[in-house]
Image (cartoon, helix red, strand yellow):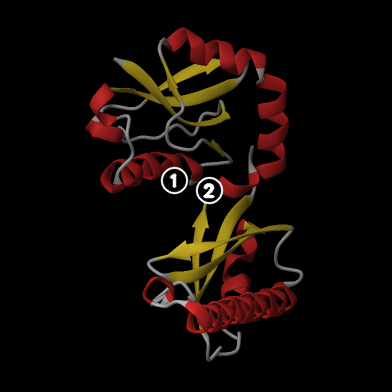
């Protein structure tokens, strides 16, 4: 049996009154060292690979603790052979973790996703040859460039609208179910969640894209 680490946070008296259940419905307990606590549960080899129920259970633990204060969330898969190794981690990285937690106190992550029709969908290349293939290829990449430019324009507009309501932001791009996806992550003060949402609701409707917001979340994208 191994040990799964969920998050790190400062020791405090506001401990969770209800027993948390993590991946595989296993009890979550705390490893304390150097003024810090690590939320941990035992995990079997069968549960090491993430799937949707396991990831949701993992996130639920982190979010429950985050409601009481700043946390450093880890990504699924921070697994240790021995409980002692987690205590050693808190000892070795204690100063770094403490500094990061002070910086994150009172902050949450808000997300914005921009979905655009992707040039990958219905790609006609395999059935074509010669001039037709080259023409289709040019059209495909022209469409992809157009989507990228539109996403960049939307991103700039959203950042301008939300200026003053976040301290930092990060941007990621990729594909989801055949659609181009632009993910924007904002570090927002807890007391600015409602103003952030109200400003976001004033964003324009984009004919070529669907824009959604989510959160508040623990600051997954603002820790390393």
Q: With respect to residue 36, does 102 lie above or below? A: below
If you read the primary sequence from the N terminus, does the residue marked by circle 1 or circle 2 appear first? 1
Element carrying mark 2: loop
Q: With respect to residue 115, does 95 lie above or below? A: above
| Residue drawn at (51%, 17%) of the image | 32
Percent across and percent down for residue 36 are: 58, 22
Name the residue that disc number 2 marks: 218
Marking on residue 169: none
Q: Quadrant of the C terminus?
A: top right
Q: Is residue 154 left or right of residue 21?
A: right
| Residue drawn at (70%, 63%) of the image | 166
Q: Are marks 1 and 2 in contact (CB under 8 Å)?
A: yes
Q: Is residue 32 left or right of residue 79?
A: right
Percent across and percent down for residue 140 are: 53, 78
Q: Nearer the viewer, residue 164 or 183?
A: 183
Q: Quadrant of the N terminus?
A: top left
Q: Nearer the viewer, residue 90 or 130?
A: 130
| Residue drawn at (35%, 43%) of the image | 55
> For residue 11, which quarter of the picture?
top right
> For residue 23, which quarter of the picture?
top left
Q: Is residue 167 left or right of residue 209?
A: right
Q: Nearer the viewer, residue 78 or 147?
A: 147
In this orientation, does residue 74 appear? yes
Name the residue that disc number 1 marks: 63
Q: With respect to residue 199, does 72 lie above or below? A: above
Percent across and percent down for residue 165 are: 70, 67
Label 2 crowd (10 A; few <14 / some 14-19 / many >=20): many
């Amino acid at each position: 049996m191994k040990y799964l680490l969920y998050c790190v946070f400062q020791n405090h008296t506001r401990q969770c009154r209800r027993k948390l259940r993590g991946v595989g419905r296993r009890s979550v307990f705390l490893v304390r060292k150097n003024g810090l606590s690590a939320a941990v549960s035992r995990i079997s080899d069968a549960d090491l690979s993430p799937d949707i129920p396991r990831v949701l259970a993992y996130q639920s633990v982190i979010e429950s603790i985050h409601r009481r204060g700043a946390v450093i969330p880890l990504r699924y898969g921070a697994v240790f052979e021995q409980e002692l190794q987690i205590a050693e981690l808190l000892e070795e990285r204690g100063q770094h973790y403490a500094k990061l937690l002070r910086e994150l106190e009172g902050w949450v992550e808000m997300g914005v996703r921009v979905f655009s029709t992707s040039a990958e969908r219905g790609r006609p290349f395999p059935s074509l040859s010669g001039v037709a293939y080259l023409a289709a290829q040019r059209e495909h990449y022209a469409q992809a460039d157009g989507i990228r430019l539109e996403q960049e324009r939307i991103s700039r507009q959203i950042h301008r609208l939300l200026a003053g309501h976040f301290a930092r932001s990060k941007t990621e791009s990729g594909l989801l179910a055949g659609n181009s996806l632009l993910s924007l992550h904002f570090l927002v003060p807890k007391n600015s969640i409602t103003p952030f949402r109200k400003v976001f609701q004033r964003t324009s409707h984009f004919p070529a894209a669907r824009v959604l917001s989510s959160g508040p979340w623990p600051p997954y994208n603002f820790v390393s």
